[in-house]
Image (spheres, rainbow, N blue to C red):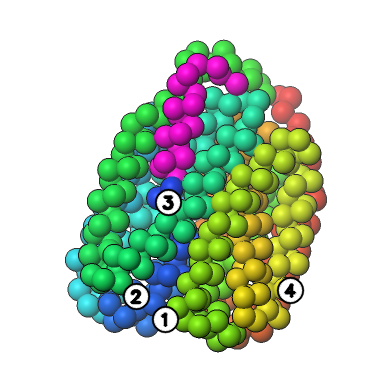
Amino acid sequence: MHEQPRAKWVLAAGAAVQLLTGIPAAWGVFQKPVMEDYGFSRGQATLGFAILVAAYGLGCLLGGYLQDARGPRAAGLLGTALLGGGFVAAAFVPQGNAVLFLLIFSLPAGLGSAFLAPSVLACVQKWYTDKKGFATGVTGIATGLSGAFLTLFVRLVGGHFGMRVCFGALGGVMLAACGAGAAVLKNPPMQEKTQPEKGDDLPPKEMLRTRQYRLCVAAVALAAPPVLLFSPDILSIAAERGLAENLAQWCVVIGSAASAAGRLACPALSDRLGRKPVLYGVYGGLAAGTLAFAFAGGWFVAAAYAALTFFYSGGAAVQPALNTDLFGLRHAGVNYGFIALGMSAGSLLSYAGSQLLPMGARHWAAGVCALAGLVCITLVKPVNKSR
């Protein structure tokens, strides 16, 4: 780990940026107000969420290339402009125009969040090379708490002034806060001397040819349905299962707190126990959580949903450290971007499932995906990097 004082500032800046990027975790609280204020159907609003997450996966790839080529600051500032600009633009979408909403909100907001993610993750891991799990976990706490912050913001501002004002206000906050945080991001000095030798790192073209890459991207995709099949509708699910409507929103807040805990605990634990053993627990937890969620009622809905968000977010926070363990740090940004394409696939798979499957079948599909992801992680072996 680099002991320069700047390391702590970079870590704090990364956490500040991530505090405003956890939109998927909070989309359940956006869904109903967006439907009401914009005149969208449930399918249109859910598609907006799915496109946002799919764009996130693609954006991680594009942002990774930019981060590796121009540094984390350039990628972070561009990501801030896309994210904040998408929220501001959403305030001006005409009533009922779902296509325009997808084009000027979902796509840029998803891409912007993704440009920020690899910038932060790759940068802090380079400053904390011997505590990658810890560094990822600290920024992950902010990502998890982002859901709680956005929930309260939407309820307060959106509830009083409507979603158009809420989107515009959030965009302004994002432009200011994420822009300030991104401006601090900088790779450590003499980075080339602190990274492994070039022969220990796999460039993207070589990584894509490995079995380990295919297994990791499949595992990332399969982790999504246990949460994304339900998160856009979590408020209505909770209400249908016995929670009063004014209490159902706490499912999102509790789920966001659990997400933050997972993003801290799982990667930090992986520094001690290893990445794969922790990921075994993650996918096993997703399978068990899916079973519990299928039968939960009342406040147990919130508890089961919190278990799902804990393990899903914990796995998402461990994956970047596993990636650099397997493929090295030199190309961490773009390599993480290629892995994140699994998020796009998982998001689109989840959207299709949420539209085509009844609730009971969604639970079965989520459980099968979790177990399949566990198999993928089990099959991942160290990469033979000798060339």
Q: Mark 3 and mark 4 in contact (Cβ < 8 Å)? A: no
Q: Residue at x 73, y 73 (%)?
A: 291
Q: Quadrant of the N terminus?
A: top right
Task: Please tell me whether mark 3 sits on a helix, a strand or a loop.
Answer: loop
**Which callout, 2 or 3, points at the residue further toward the start of the chain?**
3
Q: Which residue is mark 1?
A: 42
Residue 21 is marked as 3
Q: Residue at x 60, y 48 (%)?
A: 263
**Which callout, 4 or 2, points at the residue further toward the start of the chain?**
2
Q: Which residue is mark 2?
A: 33
| Residue 99 spot, x, y in % from top left | 30, 71
Q: Please rate how many residues cluster around mark 2, counting C-alpha atoms within 10 Å: few if below 14, some from 14 to 19, many from 20.
A: many
Amino acid marked by disc 2: Pro
Q: Mark 3 and mark 2 in contact (Cβ < 8 Å)? A: no
Amino acid marked by disc 1: Arg
Q: Which residue is mark 4?
A: 291
**Total marks placed:** 4
**Which callout, 2 or 1, points at the residue further toward the start of the chain?**
2
| Residue 51 spot, x, y in % from top left | 42, 64
**Span of residues in magenta:** 1-18
Q: Real-space Cα distance between discs 4 and 3?
A: 29 Å
Q: Is residue 133 magenta?
A: no
Q: Is residue 11 magenta?
A: yes
